[in-house]
Image (tube, grey):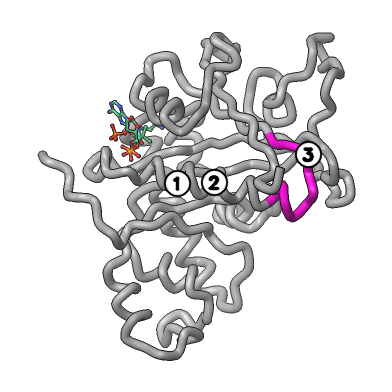
Amino acid sequence: MAAPPPTSDSDAILIPKTYSSPKDLDEIINRFKKLRLHSLKVDPVSFSSTYEEESQFPHDKWRSRIQSPLPRTFIAINDTVSKRITNDTTDSSISSPCFGDTSTSLLRLIRSEWVGMATLLGPITFPEETTNEDGAVAKPWDAFIKDQKYKMPGDVSKVEDLKGAHIVYLVVAVFTLPEVRRNGHASRLLKVIIKAIHDDIDIYGAAKASITIQLEPENPRALRLYESLGFSVWEKALPMADPWGNVSHVISLGMTVHSQSD
Ligand SMILES: CC(C)(COP(=O)(O)OP(=O)(O)OC[C@H]1O[C@@H](n2cnc3c(N)ncnc32)[C@H](O)[C@@H]1OP(=O)(O)O)[C@@H](O)C(=O)NCCC(=O)NCCS
């Protein structure tokens, strides 16, 4: 089936962390969960996690993925309806009668079709030229991987520690619905993520940032996507374990970005 043509109503929106209405929060959690589980179902080989594992997660774990400080999830949307609503009113602070929130981002997320997602973990300070637990020189992705499995860093870096630091990020859970692929949605998500990292550098006064993404060697479309955005291969065969402990090797891609004011 031919993919629908790209639309000017496509966008990539950051899921908010705070909600004035529990109903809005539940709506966002449910849609996030639905899209994430769908991604694990339709593209199981592209992810280190599995549908079987995540479909058992309790509601609180999904809530934490939305509301805990470190992960930021961006959603690719098709947005014709909410744009029409926003354009039809002169009051930019309009609240939705159904959801009771004044946030434009939230309104657009709630009113739109979700067609893709990507999650950014970070910033974490990177102690350059140190060694990790195995005695090897520390790598920019070490903060996010333990015992060959992804782990959420225990502590968020303190704001004062980010100043002048080399900070690191990991991008995970990149996915677009099969029926909308090759319309630039993933590319848009990644560009918004890179922009968010540039903003972090300026806000925190960091020296530079390293962004890494891991992918299976048999994923040439994702490799082309990341290379088209400026990522390059930093590690050809990084050992990672699946939920059952079977180890395979993934490619680790990276990109370093500096302050826009440099
Ligand atoms: C990889 C994936 C996220 C790409 O999403 P998308 O919305 O189709 O990507 P875009 O339309 O933004 O593509 C941007 C560029 O990536 C490259 N690309 C994307 N899909 C490609 C494909 N099937 N074949 C070759 N190149 C491809 C192209 O360079 C493309 O630019 P172009 O269309 O102008 O040639 C999507 O195919 C997907 O969800 N796959 C399954 C999950 C997955 O692999 N996630 C990545 C895990 S690391």
Quadrant of the drawing holding the C terminus: top right
Amino acid found under the numbered disc labelled 1? Leu
Camera sees residue 188 = yes
**Above/below status of 41 relative to 22:** above
Q: Position of residue 90 (x, y in %)?
A: 40, 90
Q: Position of residue 119 (x, y in %)?
A: 54, 44
* Residue at image point 52% right, 57% down: 14
Tell me if 130 is positioned left or right of 211 in this view. Answer: right
Would you say the beta carbon of the disc 1 residue lies within 8 angstroms of ligand 1?
yes
Residue 211 falls inside the magenta stretch: no
Q: Earlier in the sequence, mark 3 or mark 2?
A: 2
Please state which of residues 220 and 246 is positioned toward the viewer in this rendering.
220
Q: What separation in Å lies between label 3 and label 1 (alpha carbons)?
A: 24 Å
Q: Label 1 near label 2: C-beta < 8 Å?
A: yes
Q: Which residues are magenta?
A: 200-209
Q: Position of residue 164 (x, y in %)?
A: 84, 41
Q: Nearer the viewer, mark 3 or mark 1?
A: 3
Q: Which residue is mark 2?
A: 193
Badge 1 crowding class, 10 Å Cα cut-off, few under 14, some 14 to 19, many 20 or more, is many
Badge 2 crowding class, 10 Å Cα cut-off, few under 14, some 14 to 19, many 20 or more, is many
Which quarter of the figure has residue 79?
A: bottom left
Amino acid found under the numbered disc labelled 3? Ala
* The disc label shown at residue 207, or none: 3
Please state which of residues 251 and 56 is positioned toward the viewer in this rendering.
251
Q: Which residue is mark 1?
A: 189
**Above/below status of 15 relative to 174:** below
* Residue at image point 44% right, 25% down: 227
* Residue at image point 64% right, 41% down: 121
Q: Earlier in the sequence, mark 3 or mark 1?
A: 1
Would you say the beta carbon of the disc 2 residue lies within 8 angstroms of ligand 1?
no
Please state which of residues 70 and 127 is positioned toward the viewer in this rendering.
127
